[in-house]
Image (cartoon, rainbow, N blue to C red):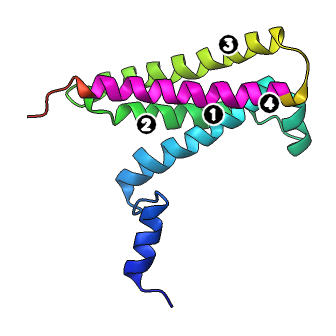
Amino acid sequence: MASPKATKSVATKIGLKPLNTHTLLYYYVPFQGVLSYTALSINVMNPSLVLRVFPRKDITNILLLNTLLGSGLFLYNRSHLRALNQKDRIVYSAFGAVTFSLGSVLIWAILRSVIPKNVALCTFCGLGTSLALIKIGSGYAKHLDSLIKET
């Protein structure tokens, strides 16, 4: 049987963090939000594919809610918002989450209307744009954080 130290190092190597309230809210929920966001991109770009997996249930609202929750908690925990009072942190992080998520849905809807009706192409465009937008959004948040002088 592996020692706890060996198990911890394997978990750390693959990016897992110890489970506590802080990591649950600000690491695992945002990570789950990323997964929902990428699934949402496929759902918007290629709804027939998602209907094959979930034929009796439209999961769009579930994916959107999980995306909003994950991105909202990601933003709420950023350094550049920590000096604000709790009400403003909540408002700004909610605004960022809604703007990012619904802006993305609009981008995907427009993309879907202009690219050829090809299942593979739509899926690839959805995944590609979702990963690119996540990279841009997280890079922007890191840049804002870098402007904060630690005391």
Return the x and y of residue 35 as percentages of the image width and height: 62, 42
Amino acid of disc 4: Thr
Return the x and y of residue 57 as percentages of the image width and height: 84, 39
Span highlighted in magenta in the image? 121-145
Name which of mark 4 and mark 1 comes first in the sequence: 1
Label 4's element?
helix
Residue drawn at x 44%, y 30% is: 138
Q: From the viewer's perspective, is the residue at label 4 or at label 1 nearer?
A: 4
Name which of mark 4 and mark 3 comes first in the sequence: 3
Label 1's element?
helix
Circle on res. 37:
1
Residue drawn at x 46%, y 70% is: 10
Q: Which residue is mark 2?
A: 73
Q: Which residue is mark 4?
A: 123
Name which of mark 3 and mark 2 comes first in the sequence: 2
Q: From the viewer's perspective, is the residue at label 4 or at label 3 nearer?
A: 4
Separation of residues labelled 4 and 2 (CA atoms):
27 Å
Which residue is the extreme one toward the bottom? 1
Q: Nearer the viewer, residue 149 or 64?
A: 149
Work out whether residue 62 can be spotted.
no
CB-based contact (under 8 Å), mark 1 and mark 3: no
Label 2's element?
helix
Q: Which residue is mark 3?
A: 106
Amino acid of disc 3: Leu
